Image (spheres, rainbow, N blue to C red):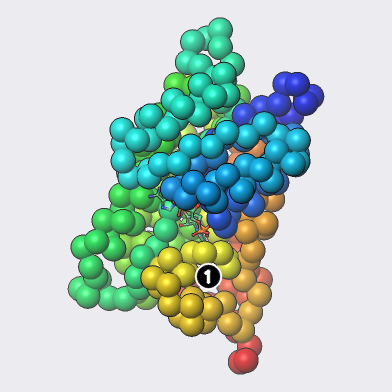
């Protein structure tokens, strides 16, 4: 939806807004005429991002919770919608967009050496968390609203050591298609953005704070940066009402697939 005037800015809820794609998306959309509702687990970081969004002229509200917790997700969405004055009745203002972005990879290696806790963190966040948040937000949406799910090249292809993360993002791919079908009669569009390698906090989380392992992921080529994905989200959300970008795969020029790279020796 195209923002019209400052007094009638559309509202977007962005999960995972404390860093990476979510933070860049919050800043980008607040610059281009959206009001923002921001979530993530890190309260202080949310406050910093909200202040930056307000400096761009947006109204911004935050609420910190863990999307793996269904009750916390329902509560967090209610808090944010109340703060923005959005409601579920047909007479009330509606949520124009959800950017369902919170997610992570934890660990990389053969599945038979995988850890229960790593698997739970990925599946509970990337699959169930995405579902919890989408379900909680849909009642606040109406004709013309849009949902953008953050998939990955890992949801299109499987790579060595990616097993459970790839499975979780394949689930996002399937759910994005299913949600599009389920919501088409209500006029709500569902898009998926599938990035390749992007330099954010993603690899530090995946390698559990091992900075050397995280930095090595981005050696020898120019990875995507968070702004590249924020620009894509803005593009998807600013299409005319009759257009839905179903699926957008965005790769670094040096990455032809999950398996094919043009890396220069450093
Ligand atoms: P970051 O680690 O920078 O950001 C991840 C965000 O998700 C953070 O804001 C984090 O917030 C939030 N998050 C993680 N777990 C939870 C949770 N349980 N509850 C609430 N929020 C949570 O990585 P990216 O920006 O790169 O990742 C964003 C999305 O993009 C993810 O879904 C990721 O899988 C996907 N992706 C990333 C790619 C990459 O190469 N970077 C490529 C393709 C897809 P907090 O820690 O404050 O809770
Ligand atoms: C993150 C990108 O290639 O590590 O989804 O799976 S990758």
Q: Quick check: 176 left or right of 7?
A: left
Residue tagged 1? 257
**Residue 10 shows up from this direction:** yes
As drawn, 222 above or below 78? below
Quadrant assignment for the N terminus: top right
Q: In which quarter of the image is residue 116?
A: bottom left
Mark 1 Cα within 10 Å, few/some/many (few <14, many 20+)?
some
Residue nearest the viewer, comparing 129 with 148: 129
User: Ligand 2 near label 1 (Cβ, under 8 Å)?
Assistant: no
Q: Quadrant of the C terminus?
A: bottom right
What's the residue at 46%, 27% (across, down)? 79
Q: Is 138 situated above or below 91?
A: below
Compared across the picture, whether 14 is left or right of 5 comes to left
Q: Is mark 1 on a helix, strand or loop?
A: loop
* Residue 41 percent location from the top left of the image: 44, 48
Residue 97 lies, in percent from the top left, at 57, 32
> Residue shown at 37%/39% (left/top)?
131
Q: Can residue 233 be seen in this view?
A: no
Q: In which quarter of the image is residue 223?
A: bottom right
Q: Is residue 250 left or right of residue 80?
A: right
């Amino acid at each position: 939806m195209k923002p019209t005037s400052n007094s009638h800015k559309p509202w977007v809820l962005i999960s995972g807004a404390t860093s990476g794609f979510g933070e860049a998306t919050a800043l980008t959309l607040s610059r281009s005429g959206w009001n923002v509702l921001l979530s993530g687990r890190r309260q202080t970081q949310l406050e910093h991002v909200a202040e930056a969004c307000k400096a761009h002229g947006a109204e911004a509200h935050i609420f910190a919770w863990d999307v793996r917790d269904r009750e916390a997700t329902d509560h967090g969405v209610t808090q944010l919608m109340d703060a923005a004055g959005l409601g579920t009745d047909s007479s009330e203002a509606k949520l124009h967009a959800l950017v369902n972005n919170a997610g992570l990879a934890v660990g990389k290696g053969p599945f038979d050496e995988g850890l229960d806790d790593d698997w739970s963190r990925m599946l509970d966040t990337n699959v169930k968390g995405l579902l919890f948040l989408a379900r909680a937000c849909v009642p606040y949406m109406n004709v013309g609203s849009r949902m953008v799910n953050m998939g990955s090249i890992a949801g299109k292809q499987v790579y060595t050591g990616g097993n459970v993360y790839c499975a979780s993002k394949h689930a996002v791919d399937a759910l994005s298609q299913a949600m599009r079908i389920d919501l088409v009669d209500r006029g709500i569009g569902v898009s998926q953005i599938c990035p390749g390698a992007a330099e954010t906090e993603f690899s530090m989380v995946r390698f559990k704070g091992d900075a050397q392992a995280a930095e090595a992921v981005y050696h020898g080529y120019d990875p995507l940066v968070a702004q590249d994905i924020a620009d894509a989200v803005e593009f998807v959300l600013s299409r005319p009402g009759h257009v839905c970008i179903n699926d957008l795969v965005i790769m670094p020029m040096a990455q032809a697939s999950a398996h094919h790279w043009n890396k220069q020796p450093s």
